């Protein structure tokens, strides 16, 4: 009997899957992956900072001590040892935290997806910084919310400008410390005012804090939980301070939130990897992370200083940039008539890559900014890459 060829079913994609997707980021990632391109476009931590030897020891120790458990299914909420270690670190920072207030997730990107599914229906109002992390927008977009953009100034998010447009919002998504993409950190005074505005207009605060441990010379202000614990949902990750390959993140929130999150998490992927949770818990308990963090901070500060010096040396007049106290990013602003999305192909021809500002805006995009990441590029290469960008901008301003 001869095989018959049948057509595949007619595609009936969901509304979400049918939405147009920007081709900017795939283009950057494709070109920036080539060795000859100096890429300031990534958001990855430096692999030079991964504590490989310590992790190898911890992995073998977990397998030797508790191998059957480490390779088995686990609890939706996460391994108790890891939740206790995270709670202990939060408590040491002056914010009393119980392990029952901690939910382990598969990276903070999953946390964003869970928060969106938990709170948002189509048309619901969400407050976001302008600009904000594009990955958060991608997660929230699946639920088709209505965005209200919150303006930022040279000191970051300014809650004093919040008005009636914030009323009836489900939550405000903020990165108060070393924000992506701007690198800015808001003061304790602004955090206190944000807490006051959240109570006045009755919205949750979703605090994303992937960079809070990567400060250079002095610790940033405390978490929003120190100012409004009753309405703060804190998202954390081990990707930037340990390794992103483990895909470990966490949510700290009031129990009424975590009960709902756990239901959604169970339906999504049942639980986060048992093995990597137990390895991370051992890393915490043996103080490996505390011994490791100073080297990461020193490395990133050296690279940030190199980029700031290169910007001073090579950027033409009329260009401004942020000066972060930690984190991985610098945000550059050029004159309003310059479109950094349009200049990107020309930059790639010069073998240098950046991320234009367009995808960092929820509503009306702005084009006269760009983000630079400095942590995966050496100081001398940073200088050469910024020099190329400076020459490009001189020709188009």
Image (cartoon, rainbow, N blue to C red):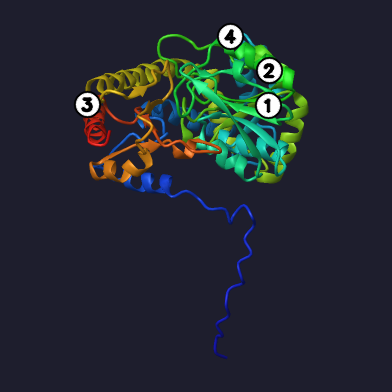
- N-terminal of the two: label 3 or label 4? 4
Label 3–label 4 contact, CB within 8 A: no
Mark 3 or 4: in front is 4
Mark 2 or 3: in front is 2
Report crowding for label 3: few under 14, some 14 to 19, many 20 or more residues within 10 A (C-alpha): few
Q: Which mark is residue 166?
A: 1
Mark 4 or 1: in front is 1
Q: Which mark is residue 197?
A: 2
Residue depicted at 49% across the width and 32% down the height: 59
Picture quarter containing residue 164?
top right
Q: Compared to 355, does 11 lie above or below?
A: below
The CA distance from mark 2 to mark 3 is 45 Å
User: 283 left or right of 308?
Assistant: right
Q: Which residue is mark 4?
A: 189
Judged from the image, the secondary structure of the residue bearing numbered disc 2 is helix
User: 63 left or right of 28?
Assistant: right
């Amino acid at each position: 009997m001869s095989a018959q060829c049948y057509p595949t079913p007619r595609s009936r994609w969901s509304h979400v899957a049918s939405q147009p997707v920007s081709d900017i980021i795939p283009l950057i990632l494709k070109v920036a992956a080539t060795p000859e391109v100096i890429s300031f476009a990534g958001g990855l931590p430096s692999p030079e900072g991964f504590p490989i030897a310590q992790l190898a020891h911890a992995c073998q120790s977990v397998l030797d001590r508790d191998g059957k458990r480490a390779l088995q299914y686990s609890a939706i909420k996460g391994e108790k040892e890891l939740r206790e270690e995270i709670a202990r670190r939060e408590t040491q920072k002056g914010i009393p935290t119980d392990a029952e207030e901690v939910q382990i997730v598969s990276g903070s990107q999953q946390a964003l997806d869970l928060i969106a599914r938990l709170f948002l229906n189509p048309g619901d109002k969400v407050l976001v910084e302008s600009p904000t992390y594009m990955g958060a927008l991608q997660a929230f977009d699946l639920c088709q919310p209505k965005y209200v953009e919150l303006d930022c100034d040279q000191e970051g998010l300014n809650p004093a400008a919040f008005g009636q447009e914030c009323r009836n919002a489900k939550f405000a998504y903020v990165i108060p410390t070393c924000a992506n993409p701007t690198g800015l950190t808001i003061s304790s005074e602004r955090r206190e005012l944000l807490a006051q505005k959240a109570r006045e207009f009755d919205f949750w605060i979703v605090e994303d804090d992937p960079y809070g441990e990567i400060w250079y010379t002095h610790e940033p202000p405390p978490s929003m939980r120190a100012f409004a614990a009753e309405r703060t949902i804190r998202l954390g990750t081990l990707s930037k301070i340990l390794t992103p390959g483990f895909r470990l993140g966490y949510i700290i929130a009031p129990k009424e939130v975590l009960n709902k999150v756990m239901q959604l998490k169970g339906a999504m992927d049942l639980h986060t990897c048992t093995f990597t949770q137990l390895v991370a818990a051992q890393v915490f308990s043996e103080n490996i992370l505390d011994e490791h963090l100073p080297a990461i901070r020193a490395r990133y500060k050296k690279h940030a200083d190199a980029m700031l010096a290169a910007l001073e040396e090579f950027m033409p007049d009329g260009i401004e940039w942020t000066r972060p106290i930690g984190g991985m990013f610098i945000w550059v602003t050029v004159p309003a008539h310059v479109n950094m999305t349009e200049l990107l192909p020309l930059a790639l021809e010069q073998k240098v890559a950046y991320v234009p500002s367009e995808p960092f805006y929820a509503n009306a995009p702005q084009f006269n900014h760009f983000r630079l990441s400095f942590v995966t590029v050496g100081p001398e290469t940073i200088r050469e890459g910024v020099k190329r960008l400076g020459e490009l901008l001189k020709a188009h301003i």
